[in-house]
Image (cartoon, grey):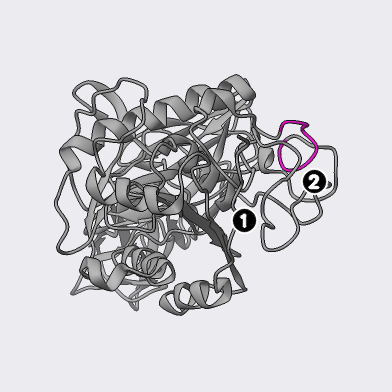
């Protein structure tokens, strides 16, 4: 008996992403959510429902062996272990759901490792940039444990569920335009909807895997499929793009990762754009996910050397660089960064150097040999002026007027001019200390400074 492939049923896509856009007012442009309904081919819909409700964890597909050794948290650890636009993994449960993070963390780690191995097998020069952090057993996923505020009953509808998950994560700070969030939702779900994924015009994207749905369909294939949706696959301009309501997929090969329906086929039996003519590594003019900044370009890794002088730190808008002292980070060539300098209390950024200049945010594009330096210094230095004889010294900026006041804190690394004025019957002879000569002295104030103005009687040599 042949298999009947159920048709993908459409959902209200625009309504789903409307809620997402309203939650982040600064996000401009239309957002696109691709709903993916993968149906297990050899089970009827009723059988799938029965299996999903009776044994949600026991039916877990075989996956790569892994042991996650981190500590569960609700924050994104920084800096990221791999610099660049990250894929951050989240385990999410309803407010009344059982917390099985301990069981799922290693399963998710195994899925991440199997997706990485599969991707490298499909393209030796690319792999997803998973958000990693250092743990006692090495670099592993920086996993987030996230409990939603809504109970299971309020998450029964697929549209309400996806919106609730994405909106809750954004409100909690998981809303970086540089990140894709891969969520394993451990709560009741329709048995035939394996996951959903999409992104908006800023780059923010969510890929949600419904782990209690689709018995037999490996989670790692759903995760990779939905992640590709967040990266922009599949353009309607692709030659084998499916017609509505299956758009966003390819229909030329049922073993293509972006085929609209899934089954028990392991990830090793699926292809990343089987003909390399639709969404990955193609020669067309439409978007190509192989160029996505969320993929590590294994053949184009470049070091950025950052030198920090003084007390302060430097961070980048793209995750992966947050340094309180000189450091070197590695990026894909061509990555555009905006660096921000943060002085410690009582200090300031004096200037950028090497690949940057000025005192505002530094914009730099990663390329071989690129270096950047940042110099921090105390906000002020003390300038002391001594007057010998009868005369006075005034400064070009407020602070020095002596006698009688001959010492003041002045802005560091901002030149100040000292002007000697002789009293009647006296003349200015010379400077000593930080100043030299017989005229106006310009002091750079790169450190605490002392200067002495010497006046003598006018009739003396």
Q: Position of residue 376 (x, y in %)?
A: 35, 49
Q: Nearer the viewer, residue 73 or 387?
A: 73
What are the residue bounds of the magenta stretch?
Answer: 274-280
Specify the quadrant that holds the N terminus: top right
Number of marks in the rendered image: 2
- Give the residue pinned by disc 2: 240
Q: Which one is in front, 80 or 88?
A: 88
Residue in the image at 41% along x and 41% along y: 321
Q: Which residue does the image show at 44% across and 60% down from the upper left?
A: 415
Can you say whether 251 is above or below 37 in the image? above
**Distance CA(mark 2)–CA(mark 1):** 17 Å
Does residue 31 appear to the left or right of 208 in the view shown?
Answer: right
Callout 2 secondary element: loop
Q: Is residue 437 visible?
A: no
Please check the rendered image and state whether residue 66 is part of the magenta-colored stretch, yes or no.
no
Label 2 environment density (alpha carbons within 10 Å; few <14, some 14–19, many ≥20): some
Tell me which secondary structure the magenta stretch mostly adopts: loop
Is the residue 362 above or below the residue 24 in the image? above
Residue 79: give x, y in percent of width and height. 33, 41
Determine the residue located farthest toward the front in the rendered image.
Answer: 1
Q: Note whether 218 is above or below 18 in the view shown.
A: above
Nearest the eye: 379 or 60: 60
The residue identified by callout 1 is 7
In the rendered structure, find residue 141 and report the number of the disc placed on it.
none
Q: Residues within 10 Å of mark 1 (few under 14, many from 20)?
A: few
Q: Residue at x 46, y 54 (%)?
A: 193
């Amino acid at each position: 008996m042949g298999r009947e492939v159920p048709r993908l049923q459409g959902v209200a896509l625009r309504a789903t992403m409307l809620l997402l856009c309203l939650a982040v007012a600064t996000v401009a442009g239309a957002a696109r959510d691709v709903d993916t309904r993968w149906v297990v081919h050899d089970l009827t819909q009723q059988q799938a429902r029965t299996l999903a409700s009776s044994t949600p964890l026991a039916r877990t597909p075989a996956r790569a062996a892994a042991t996650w050794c981190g500590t569960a948290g609700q924050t994104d650890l920084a800096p990221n272990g791999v610099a660049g636009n990250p894929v951050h993994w989240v385990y999410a449960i309803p407010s009344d759901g059982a917390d099985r993070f301990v069981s799922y963390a290693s399963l998710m780690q195994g899925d991440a490792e199997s997706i990485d191995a599969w991707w490298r097998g499909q393209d030796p020069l690319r792999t997803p940039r998973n958000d990693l952090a250092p743990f006692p057993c090495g670099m592993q996923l920086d996993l987030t444990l996230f409990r939603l505020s809504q109970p299971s009953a309020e998450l029964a509808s697929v549209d309400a569920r996806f919106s609730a998950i994405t909106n809750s994560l954004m409100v909690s700070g998981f809303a970086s335009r540089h990140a894709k969030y891969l969520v394993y939702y451990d709560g009741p779900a329709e048995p035939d909807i394996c996951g959903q994924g999409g992104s908006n015009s800023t780059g923010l994207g969510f890929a949600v895997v419904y782990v209690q749905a689709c018995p037999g369909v490996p989670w790692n294939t759903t995760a990779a499929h939905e992640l590709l949706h967040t990266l922009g696959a599949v353009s309607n301009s692709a030659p084998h793009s499916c017609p509505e309501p299956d758009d966003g997929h390819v229909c030329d090969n049922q073993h293509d990762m972006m085929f609209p329906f899934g089954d028990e086929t392991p990830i090793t039996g699926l292809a990343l754009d089987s003909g390399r003519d639709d969404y990955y590594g193609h020669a067309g003019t439409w978007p190509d996910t192989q160029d996505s900044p969320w993929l590590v370009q294994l053949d184009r890794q470049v070091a950025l050397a950052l030198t920090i002088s003084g007390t302060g730190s430097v961070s980048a808008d793209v995750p992966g660089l947050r340094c309180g002292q000189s450091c070197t980070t590695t990026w894909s060539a061509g990555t555009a960064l905006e660096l921000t300098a943060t002085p410690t209390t009582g200090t300031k950024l004096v200037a950028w150097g090497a690949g940057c200049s000025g005192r505002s945010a530094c914009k730099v594009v990663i390329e071989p040999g690129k270096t950047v330096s940042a110099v921090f210094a105390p906000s002020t230095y003390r300038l002391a002026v001594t007057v010998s004889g009868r005369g006075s010294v005034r400064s070009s900026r407020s602070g020095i007027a002596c006698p009688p006041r001959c010492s003041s804190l002045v802005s560091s690394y901002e030149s100040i001019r000292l002007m000697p004025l002789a009293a009647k019957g006296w003349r200015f002879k010379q400077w000593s200390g930080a100043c030299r000569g017989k005229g106006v002295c310009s002091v750079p104030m790169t450190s605490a400074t002392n200067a002495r103005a010497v006046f003598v009687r006018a009739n003396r040599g």
